[in-house]
Amino acid sequence: MNAPFTTLDDDTLDLGDLPRSLGFMLRLAQISSFAHFFREFADCDVKPGEFTVIWVIGLNPGVKQGALARTLHIKPAHMTKLVQRMVRDGLVRREIPSEDRRSVRLSLTPAGEAHLKRYRGNFLAVHSAERIGLTESESRQLLALLNKLTLQEAPECP
Amino acid sequence: MNAPFTTLDDDTLDLGDLPRSLGFMLRLAQISSFAHFFREFADCDVKPGEFTVIWVIGLNPGVKQGALARTLHIKPAHMTKLVQRMVRDGLVRREIPSEDRRSVRLSLTPAGEAHLKRYRGNFLAVHSAERIGLTESESRQLLALLNKLTLQEAPECP
DNA sequence: TGGAAAAAGTTTCCATGTAAACATTCAGCC
DNA sequence: GGCTGAATGTTTACATGGAAACTTTTTCCA
């Protein structure tokens, strides 16, 4: 009776109900998703957050920095740094509009447009159904559920 | 013709296909999930990662630190810091087994057990279906899809 | 056996992201 | 007009998490 109950195999752990915890599974899924992303963009130094920002600026030229931050759930302090880097890299243009000199309006430079055009396809393909081992229908379902989950959130409680 | 196409409303942005990007939606979902978590544990200072670690140690007393890290996809360097903090807080016990003095085996102290018992219910309840605005069936489906997604991952490519 | 290679953690340094205090500018009211 | 308060970003200081180099111990094999 000296054999311990647990840890018969040192590497097979009992997780209990953890795989039924949404928070835990979301974390694992995101790690997995990041792995896919960085496999696709192994050589070039494209980062998910940065590319998302460029994407949205491209679709909304002249967007206000704050609106962008709120929409993508990026904190203002962080957005400032992201924008500074992208401006430094010549991808984004900052403009202080005379109508409200507190705010900052963002648009893509030609280099930014080129960057977006170049990687747009890869970005969309990264999480295509077959790439992640789901059927087309499962993938749609998953996206629908995640959308619903996200929209439940209270919008900007102050 | 001086009215711009986009940005008619400064705060309503066109996201294009972004809501159909799994990576993006996973990020939003996790942010939403964190918000739920921290609303539940507003006063007490329970953190998701830390509690998960305590949970698994509780289920697998004597688990090796490395096995824990691999299972939860926490990097060894980070795990070291987590464990140091939990030991400092008196929740976890570290033990160097004489059979392999490189490794570290972890178990809960009585205080750790008490902590686990005390918050276990809340932890499970945080993401119950009705809390997150999904039906019971949707919640099950979502978890199943996330599980499938995660399991597709190549196991520990060296 | 004894020396090279692997395994397990730790340390150090860095990137990412947040919170709190701080300008600056605008809006509204007296 | 001029002051108060809100809105918008920025700065600073800190927390979180990861990569790479390092230490110690074990394994393996010549």
Image (cartoon, coloured by chain):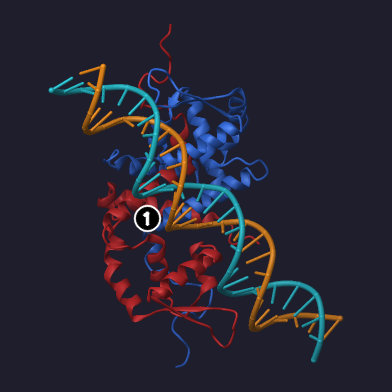
Chain colours: A blue, B red, C cyan, D orange
| Closer to the camera in the image, A120 or A138 | A120
Residue A6 place in picture, x, y as percent: 45, 80
Looking at the picture, tell me which residue is in the foreground, B19 or A107. Answer: A107
| Residue B121 appearing in the image | yes
**Residue at position x 63%, y 30% from top?**
A118
Local crowd size for mark 1, using a 10 Å CA cut-off: few (<14), some (14–19), many (≥20): many
Residue A140 image-quadrant placement: top left
Position of residue B154 measured from the top left corner of the image (x, y, whole percent): 59, 57
Q: Nearer the viewer, residue B34 or B81?
A: B81
Q: Is residue D8 above or below residue B4?
A: below
**Residue A124 shows in this picture:** no
Query: Residue lying furthest bottom in this view?
Result: A1
User: Residue at the location (59% across, 33% down)?
Assistant: A88
For this view, does D28 lie left or right of residue B76?
A: right
SS assignment at label 1: helix
- Chain containing the residue with disc 1: A
* Residue topped by disc 1: A22
